[in-house]
């Protein structure tokens, strides 16, 4: 039996949360003395399959046998089932049915704790009548894990004897597995029968909001604004700093509700959980539900005029003062270098 990871991909690239899930899977597989298999769903997903073969810790890659090819040599990520789109594999019902059909091969089934993973794996647990562990942040053995409780304020050990173990992984808790050069790709590829189409649901299209340049969970740097921003002109100062840093723009719930940023920019429990190299929190108080979404950041810089703001307890560096004064000065300094 093998540890299976359901990998998400876009434009032929395995997502960062999926690569972090592979890291967790490798730790489980080492504890259980077994292997790691990555399932790359989708039709004509050869670029993503090729990348999966290059990821460290991967022993085997499964792909849909849509064209009879099992070597990952086809290219492109478009296409799909009749009446759908190239993203038709993102429908949770058929994916859960596929995993249930193949479940006897797996000791564990893992997915990142993304909207897709949190949709597919509970369905799988229901189909198999098995318990599910959500949001793993530590691996302590093949069946022993640690997961957060109470908005991340507590870490709780848990244990399950279920087979297969069904679990989502909080990707910000694990470093993404490394990608090797193309010449080092060695994981064999096995074609499996794709799931039957779900005639009750059809994915018509996917669109990224115009204001979002990329997925926040993939960003290396994020500049986020919160309650202290009062107008679109103020928000433009934040966007200017993000542009100067080459960063994505994030927001707290208050900024979203104020119409300053789209919902896709939300960082927190009800938005994205992120782990960038740099997180700049500007005029953000540091409420628990926001901190839970960004505490995986490697370096946190807080810009706030309140020396007692809770966000300062999360910060590696702090600038105390009014952002209307500090942001233009920071941008000018960055642009002069």
Image (cartoon, helix red, strand yellow):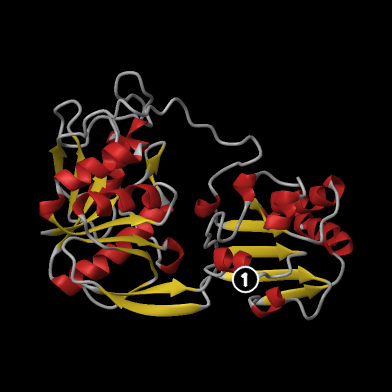
Residue named by callout 1: 288
Q: Nearer the viewer, residue 15 or 271?
A: 271
State whether residue 329 is above or below residue 100.
below
Residue occupying image coordinates x 26% and y 63%: 131
Q: Is residue 235 left or right of residue 298?
A: right
Task: Using the rendered view, name the quadrant where residue 8 is placed.
Answer: top left
Q: Quadrant of the C terminus?
A: bottom right
**x then y, percent, for residue 221:** 60, 57
Q: Is residue 217 left or right of residue 308?
A: left
For this orientation, the residue located farthest to the top is 83
Residue occupying image coordinates x 32% and y 37%: 47
State whether residue 71 is above or below residue 319.
above
Task: Using the rendered view, name the quadrant where residue 331 is placed.
Answer: bottom right
State whether residue 327 is above or below residue 262.
below
Q: Nearer the viewer, residue 233 or 107?
A: 107
Secondary element under disc 1, as helix, strand or loop, is helix
Whether residue 327 appears in this view of the structure is: yes
Whether residue 177 appears in this view of the structure is: no
Q: Nearer the viewer, residue 127 or 76?
A: 127
Residue occupying image coordinates x 89% and y 62%: 325
């Amino acid at each position: 039996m093998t540890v299976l990871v359901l990998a998400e991909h876009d434009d032929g690239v395995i997502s960062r949360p999926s690569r972090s899930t592979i890291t967790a899977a490798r730790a489980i597989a080492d504890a259980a003395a077994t292997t790691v298999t990555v399932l790359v769903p989708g039709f004509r997903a050869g670029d993503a399959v090729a990348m999966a073969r290059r990821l460290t810790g991967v022993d085997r890659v499964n792909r849909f046998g849509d064209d009879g090819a099992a070597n990952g040599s086809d290219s492109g990520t478009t296409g799909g089932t009749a009446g759908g789109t190239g993203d038709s594999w993102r429908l949770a019902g058929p994916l859960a049915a596929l995993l249930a059909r193949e479940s006897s091969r797996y000791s564990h089934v893992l997915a990142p704790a993304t909207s897709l993973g949190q949709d597919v794996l509970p369905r799988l647990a229901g189909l198999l009548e098995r318990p599910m562990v959500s949001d793993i942040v530590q691996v302590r053995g093949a069946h022993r894990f640690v997961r957060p409780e109470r908005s991340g304020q507590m870490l709780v050990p848990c244990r399950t004897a279920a087979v297969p173990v069904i679990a989502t992984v909080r990707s910000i808790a694990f470093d993404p597995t490394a990608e090797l050069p193309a010449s080092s790709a060695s994981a064999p590829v096995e074609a499996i029968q794709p799931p039957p189409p779900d005639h009750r649901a059809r994915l018509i299209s996917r669109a990224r909001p115009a204001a979002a340049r990329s997925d926040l969970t993939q960003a290396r740097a994020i500049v986020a604004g919160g309650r202290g921003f009062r107008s679109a002109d103020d928000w433009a100062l934040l966007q200017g700093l993000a542009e100067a840093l080459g960063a994505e723009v994030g927001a707290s719930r208050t900024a979203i509700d104020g119409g300053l940023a789209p919902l896709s920019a939300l960082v927190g429990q009800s938005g994205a959980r992120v782990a960038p190299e740099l997180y700049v929190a500007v005029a953000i108080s540091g409420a628990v539900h926001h901190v839970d979404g960004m505490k995986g950041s490697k370096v946190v810089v807080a810009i706030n005029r309140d020396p007692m703001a809770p966000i300062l307890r999360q910060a590696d560096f702090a600038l105390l003062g009014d952002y209307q004064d500090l942001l233009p000065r920071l941008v000018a300094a960055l642009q002069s270098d």
